[in-house]
Image: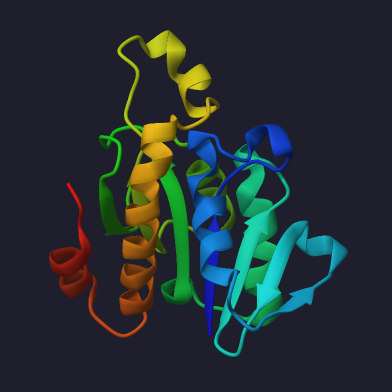
Amino acid sequence: MFLIAGLGNIGQEYELTRHNIGFMVIDFMTKNLSTSTINKSNFNADVLKSAYNIFVKPKTYMNNSGQSIVAIKDYYKIENENIIVIHDDLDLPFGTVKFKLGGSHGGHNGLRSLDAHIGKEYLRVRIGIGKPQNKAEVVNHVLSNFSKEELNKLEDIIPHTLKAIESLKTESLNEVKSKYTLK
């Protein structure tokens, strides 16, 4: 069983923000899937379970994502090698999709929380959202909505990302990188 988590912030005001790309991917993955909803208050997340996967959108807001994921990981006894986390990445140009196992959180507070709660060795699907020129604008940038043009491009990027996530379950990380990395 795989735990597939999208990072983001709860609430309608965050729905189409750059920081919520992980939630957007989870929503797209599960919209036509036969799933059941799992309601456990200690999960503090929207959790859907299919035959082979658990899909998670933490309700803890980005900065505390690890609290939710560790509760689900421990309950279902899922090893880190079967955890896939989808998140936004400021250091990648918009539309870039890269894959990584472990490593630094790179200043991403959601990943920092995950690292503190489950360790660093989990698969990461990094989706580029671009970086503002002025470092002081980072918070506004990640919490701003995608433009209409960017949303149109995401209509191709998200399905591509889903194929890659499915491949991560059966192929090596290097194979997935060579087939699905978008630059």
How did the renderer colour the structure?
A: rainbow
Q: Residue furthest bottom?
A: 51
Residue 76 pos. (x, y %): 66, 80
Q: Is residue 105 left or right of residue 6?
A: left
Q: Is residue 48 above or below residue 8?
A: below
| Quadrant of the image occupied by residue 101 | bottom left
Identified at 48% across, 35% down, the residue is: 18
**Quick one: 44 or 35, which is closer to the camera?**
35
Number of numbered markers = 0
Residue 138 pos. (x, y %): 44, 19
Identified at 37% across, 63% down, the residue is: 159
Residue 107 visible somewhere in the drawing: no
Identified at 61% across, 75% down, the residue is: 54
Residue 7 pos. (x, y %): 55, 49
Q: Is residue 148 left or right of residue 116?
A: left
Q: Residue furthest right?
A: 41
Q: Is residue 139 above or below residue 159?
A: above
Q: Is residue 122 left or right of residue 5?
A: left
Identified at 24% across, 71% down, the residue is: 173
Q: Is residue 153 above or below residue 137?
A: below
**Quick one: 37 or 153, which is closer to the camera?**
153
| Quadrant of the image occupied by residue 40 | bottom right
Residue 18 visible somewhere in the drawing: yes
